[in-house]
Structure formats: C-alpha cells, structure tokens
Image (tube, rainbow, N blue to C red):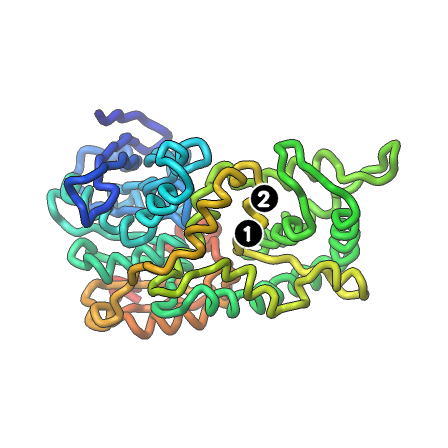
Amino acid sequence: MSHSYRQPGVVLTDRHFTVPLDHADPGGETIELYAREAVASDKSGQDLPWLVYLQGGPGFGANRFVGRQAWLDRALKEFRVLLLDQRGTGRSTPATRQTLPLRGGPAAQADYLTHFRADSIVRDCEAIRPRLTGGAPWTVLGQSFGGFCTVSYLSLAPEGVRTAIVTGGLPSLHAHADDVYRAAYPRIERKVAAHYARYPQDVERARRIADHLLGHDVVLPNGYRLTVEAFQSLGLMLGTGDGSHRLHHLLEDAFVRAAGGPELSDAFQEEAQALLSYASHPLYALVHESIYGQDVRPTDWAAERVRAEFPQFDAAKALAGDGPVLFTGETVHPWTFDTDPALRPLRETAELLAARTDWRPLYDPARLAVNEVPVAAAVYHDDMYVDTAHSLGTARAIRGLRTWVTDEFEHDGLRTGAPRVLDRLLALARDEV
C-alpha cells in the first residue's frame, strides 16, 4: 500500500516493491525495497518523465529531504523523482548486526551479501521501472557509488535509461581494489597537506591527540574504541566542501583539564563517535571493497595492505620525529570491525567477503564502447574519493559521454552546488552547451 503526504512545495508517496534476492533466480527468495516518490505540488497530476536517484555509498539510504532541498528543487521542475533506498539500506531490507544473524552464521551472511552490489541494484531498478513508467526509460542520476551503479546500468540494461547523469562517480572499468587504494593514498596526503596549510595550528593538535591515544585506552560513550588509526580516519571529512573546516573545529575542542590531568573532552568524544560509527550504515564497511571485485582475485583488505606501502601514514613514526600525523580517508580496515560495536559481531562475515574469489564483472566495456544513451558526468579535480585519472579513462571508454571537469566543488558538489551542478549536466547530456 502506498501513502501520500505533503511537505512544502512537494507531494511525497511511499513506494514498496518486492524483488528477487538473486535476479538470476526469479522464483527464489525475495526482499523488500522502499522508495520515496517526489513530485512538485503544482505538477502532481501531470504525466511527467521519471528520474531515479542512486545514492552514494555503498550502504546509505537515499536522502531524506525536507521539501525541495538541494538538487531536488531543480529536478522537480521537470521530473517525477524516485529516491530509492538501495537494497540493504534505509527501509529496504536493511543489512545490519541486528538483521544479518537471521540469515544464519557468517558464511551464510557473506553469501547473502554478494547480492548487494551494483549489478543487483541495477536489476532492482529494472524490476520496478515498468511498474512506475509503464515501460518507458527514465533518467538516472548517480552520485558517487550511485555513479558506479549508473555505469553498471549502461552495461547491463541501457534500454532502461533515457539519460544518465553522474556526479563524482565514474569508476575504473578494470582496476583491482589494490590499484584503487594505491592511487588513493597520495590524493589523501595532498588533502591533508592542504588542510595543514590552511590550519597550521592543527599540526600540533593532531600530534597531541595521537600521542594521547597511543598512551591511553579510550572508549567513547557508545563503546567505540578510539585508537590512533581510528582517529586518523577522521580525514574522511577532507573530501567534502566544508570538511577541512569541520575537522579544524573538532580538533580545537579536543582536550579539557580534568582532576587527573588533560582528557579528551566529552564534546570531542561525542562528535567523534558520531563521525566514526557505522551503526547507521554498516553495509558500507561490509561491502565497500567488494565494489571493486570483478574477477577471481580477492580484495583481501586492500586498503590495509596498500597502506603499508605508504609509511608516512604511520602515526607512531610521525610522533617519533617532528612530522605531521597524516589523516586517512575513505578506507575500511580489519581493525574497523574491532573498534566499532556496530560491526564487531560481523567481523567473521567481513573476513569471508574479503577472501572471496568469485566476483562477477560489473561493467561491460564492449557495450559501453557503443553506448547510445546520452551521458554527462561531473569529474571533480583531485576528488579524494574517486580517482580523477580513473574517471577520465572511463569517460573516454563510454561512447558519447560528455564530462565537466571542475575544481569549483569537492566530491559533494551535487549537494553544495545544487541546483547549478544538475542544471549544467542535464544541459550537457542534451547537447545544449
């Protein structure tokens, strides 16, 4: 049953769908999907073309907008929009420490989670599209990992796509996870250097926090063990438009003078746990490296292994000298499943996924080379999360794709630059600029 309701300037409708867990076995087990339809209040009765939004991640549900926020305002001028909670996220049969034990033990959980990658998300879209559009193709807007899904869409079912828009999410068609992280660590280092150039006082602040963590066992209020490696991972913020400023404010409030000496403040601990916890999106940690799995090679904790090639990220070595402590970025490590109480019960499941050797290809280079769907992509110069060179290589491999390469925005340009980013990309796809 669908329910409609109103927010300022928009009519929203809850949509529920039943789809196969494994689209190769359509008569087998099913899962439930949730999506929120949005249409402008003054157009709710009109027959509008559809736009489906694929969220970044993996592991995040679709944006919960209030009214016509961000890019949605621009989209509602001409589209009926479907905000899809991709399988395993939000209200779409969520995969968490609470729900996964219903599958059985770690091996059963790992087998189940192999069905939560981009190819399955594309098949979900194709299963629900005819029910909404009557069979007509729709526009696909993919942000970050949603862009990866969009390239899979063009590989697997281009007949379902009228226009494809990608923001910060053109993946390499061939790179193994090792290649992805080998390219990532130098980008992360550049972002950290830029942060310290902007806020030089943060060099000593980060060193002080790291030194404290090496000498103390710090457990945050939610049970998260704040190790020095976990502290370094707060550098994830540096890939967003305001992330450097938010990191600076976090560091400046780190310590208070207590009866037993300096301690990490409650305010710092509260904000740090909100930034570090995977409680709201555990699927991200579980399947993050698997989004790069396309052959018989295991991902095998690629981010952790490749980090050893970059000793400048070792905080203890930095503290032994006078160098800065380097933050890290969008990486998941084995220790993540020890520090975070939301992930601890899933450690063995994560190990089994990291060892898996039967990943299917997610992209079809031959089909992309003859693509006929209008495609436009925003490629953010020196994007911390998605390698620019990888993105541009893929842009050249997809016939007819038009790129907008810009350093005006960071990876979250669709949020910070809305509605201008979406407006420009739609115009590019339509060959209007």
Q: Amino acid at mark 2?
A: Asp
- Of residues 48 and 289, the one drawn nearer to the viewer in this rendering: 289
- Of residues 179 and 11, the one drawn nearer to the viewer in this rendering: 179
Q: Secondary structure at mark 2?
A: helix
Q: Amino acid at mark 1?
A: Pro
Residue 273 quadrant: top right
Asked if the residue under mark 2 is in contact with the one under mark 1, i.e. CB atoms within 8 Å, the reply is yes
Residue 411 at what x, y percent from top left? 48, 57
Residue 71 at what x, y percent from top left? 38, 47
Q: In percent of the image, x 21 and y 68: which residue is there?
A: 367
Residue 262 quadrant: top right
Residue 291 at what x, y percent from top left? 39, 56
User: Looking at the image, can residue 275 be seen?
Assistant: no
Q: In percent of the image, x 59 and y 38: which residue is there?
A: 274
Q: Label 1, label 2: how many angstroms apart (C-alpha)?
A: 7 Å
Q: Is residue 117 above or below residue 168?
A: above
Q: Tell me if 301 is positioned left or right of 255 in this view.
A: left
Q: Is residue 32 above or below residue 357?
A: above
The residue tagged 1 is 334
Q: Is residue 433 above or below residue 25?
A: below
Check the image and name the residue furthest to the left. Answer: 134
The residue tagged 2 is 338
Q: In percent of the image, x 32 and y 59: which residue is there?
A: 358
Q: In percent of the image, x 31 and y 67: which residue is there?
A: 433
